[in-house]
Image (cartoon, helix red, strand yellow):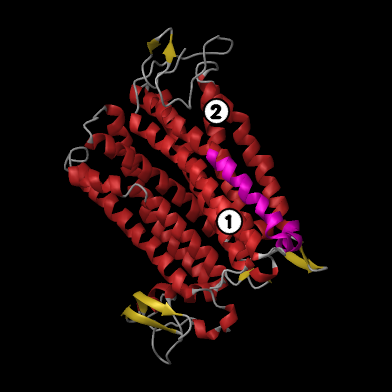
């Protein structure tokens, strides 16, 4: 692949969106997790739910801020680097992004302040309502963004007028063929990301002898979530694959490393190998006969289109998507295995004492993010060479910039992102390392003049030369 202006524009957008997608996925999962923690606190009055809420809301706040910043940078690139795409599809993608701002972002922004700073300044019912609204806002945000991106994958409900895509049926635009599958798949991915991060945080503290009721509850909730969500994600992924086979057959052929059908034979499942785009074959292939047909057509000898059925210029890069898909699926099976191991340890009363299990949970902490990024690469690279599938080629959507300008801005992005978001990530890890501290629950109420919580604090507070207890809300 030559590093021309087109490739540099793709790399730049891919780099910025890869950073951005991390933060919203954590935000979606943590917002729902905070909602559950506050609900249990209000229902049971148990202290560890209160402590966990105040522990994770600090991490949520920092992560939310980084998500907003990275999202703004990414959005500007539609105008700077992809102006022809914006001109062609702006009548559809523009309103969808505007709806995201007018509904989801305004909902989050409207209640985020109460959620972060209003614990002891409003009643418990209003504060819980604010937490619910923020959680709902994160899910709404994902809905609109995925509606826009899914339309690019499986466009529907439009007509082309004067070389522009014009919406004629907004229901069909939003609920395009791949949207339901991708929305559920991404939502479950966000919950898995959060469960693995929460579980890894608890495992780290238990391995370092910080064994408290809050830490134990954190690990227990994370493993329950993993046990429920990971198998469901596998089933949803299978339905998503069938949808891809129907609407994006070239992508599916690249994912499977399937080049051509043999008369009268089922399609094997290629477990491992190296698809060669030039020679149009797989090197070092390890195959299971007919299993590809069984999975994708649900028949022993069913066949589907191979890459040779498509013109060379219409084929996605099978070498890349073949492996990104297997990274995602492989990590998914490891998650299911970890969840079953944790369930067995729980049944034996060893969930919090088994050091091999705790180490495995700790090492699996980043796996949700890695699997999500691998899945995103499979989806986006598998769509190529189309920016709007079978409608507009990626090469026709890029702005008229030279390779020098794009290379320079890409280098600046890399430097600035690693400095800014690297510092933010270090700060989040520092917050996680502190662990949940015992809080002083105060019901609060309207009109009470207390000092609001300090959700961004990761260091001891000072007053009159004396150090206050770490992570304690000042009232």
Magenta-colored span = 66-91
Mark 1 in CB contact with mark 2 (< 8 angstroms): no
Dot in front, 1 or 2: 1
Residue found 39% across the figure and 20% down from its top: 460
Where residue 440 appears, as percent x and y from the top left, is 39, 15
Disc sitting over residue 147 in the figure: none
| Residue 86 among those drawn in magenta | yes
Q: In the image, 211: left or right of 460?
A: left
**Residue at the disc numbered 1:** 410
Q: Is residue 33 above or below residue 298?
A: above
| Residue 228 among those drawn in magenta | no
Where residue 120 appears, as percent x and y from the top left, is 50, 16
Assign a secondary structure to mark 2.
helix
Where residue 211 appears, as percent x and y from the top left, is 23, 30
Which SS does the magenta portion mostly show?
A: helix
Assign a secondary structure to mark 1.
helix
**Residue at the disc numbered 2:** 129
Q: From where the camera sits, is residue 475 visible?
A: yes
């Amino acid at each position: 692949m030559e590093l021309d202006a087109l490739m540099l524009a793709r790399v730049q957008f891919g780099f910025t969106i890869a950073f951005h997608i991390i933060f919203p996925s954590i935000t979606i999962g943590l917002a729902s997790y905070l909602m559950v923690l506050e609900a249990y606190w209000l229902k049971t009055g148990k202290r560890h739910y209160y402590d966990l809420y105040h522990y994770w809301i600090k991490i949520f706040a920092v992560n939310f801020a980084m998500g907003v910043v990275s999202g703004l940078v990414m959005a500007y690139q539609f105008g700077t680097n992809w102006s022809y795409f914006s001109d062609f599809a702006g009548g559809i993608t523009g309103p969808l992004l505007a709806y995201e701002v007018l509904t989801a972002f305004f909902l989050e922004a409207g209640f985020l302040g109460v959620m972060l700073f209003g614990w002891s300044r409003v009643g418990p019912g209003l504060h819980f309502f604010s937490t619910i609204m923020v959680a709902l806002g994160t899910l709404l945000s994902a809905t609109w963004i995925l509606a826009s991106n899914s339309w690019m994958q499986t466009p529907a409900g439009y007509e082309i007028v004067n070389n522009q895509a014009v919406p004629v049926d907004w229901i069909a635009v939003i609920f395009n063929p791949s949207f339901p599958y991708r929305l559920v798949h991404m939502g479950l991915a966000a919950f898995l990301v959060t469960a693995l991060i929460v579980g890894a945080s608890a495992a780290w503290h238990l391995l370092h002898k910080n064994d408290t009721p809050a830490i134990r509850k954190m690990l227990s909730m994370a493993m329950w979530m993993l046990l429920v969500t990971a198998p469901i994600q596998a089933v949803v992924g299978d339905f998503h694959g069938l949808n891809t086979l129907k609407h994006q057959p070239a992508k599916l052929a690249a994912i499977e490393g399937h080049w051509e059908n043999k008369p009268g034979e089922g399609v094997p499942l290629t477990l491992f190998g190296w698809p060669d785009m030039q020679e149009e074959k797989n090197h070092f292939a390890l195959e299971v006969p007919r299993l590809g047909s069984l999975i994708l057509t649900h028949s022993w000898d069913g066949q589907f289109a191979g890459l040779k059925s498509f013109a060379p210029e219409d084929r996605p890069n099978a070498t890349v998507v073949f492996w990104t898909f297997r990274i995602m699926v492989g990590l998914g099976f490891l998650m299911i295995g970890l969840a079953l191991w944790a369930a067995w340890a729980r049944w034996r009363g060893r969930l919090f004492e088994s050091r091999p299990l705790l180490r495995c949970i700790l090492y699996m902490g980043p796996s949700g993010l890695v699997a999500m990024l691998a899945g995103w690469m499979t989806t986006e690279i598998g769509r190529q060479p189309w920016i709007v599938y079978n409608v507009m080629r990626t090469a026709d959507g890029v702005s008229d910039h030279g390779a020098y300008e794009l290379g320079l801005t890409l280098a600046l992005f890399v430097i600035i992102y690693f400095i800014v978001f690297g510092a933010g990530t270090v700060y989040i890890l520092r917050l996680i390392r502190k662990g949940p501290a015992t809080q002083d629950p105060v019901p609060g109420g309207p009109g009470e003049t207390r000092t609001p919580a300090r959700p961004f604090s990761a260091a001891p507070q000072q007053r009159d030369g004396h150090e206050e207890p770490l992570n304690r809300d000042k009232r």
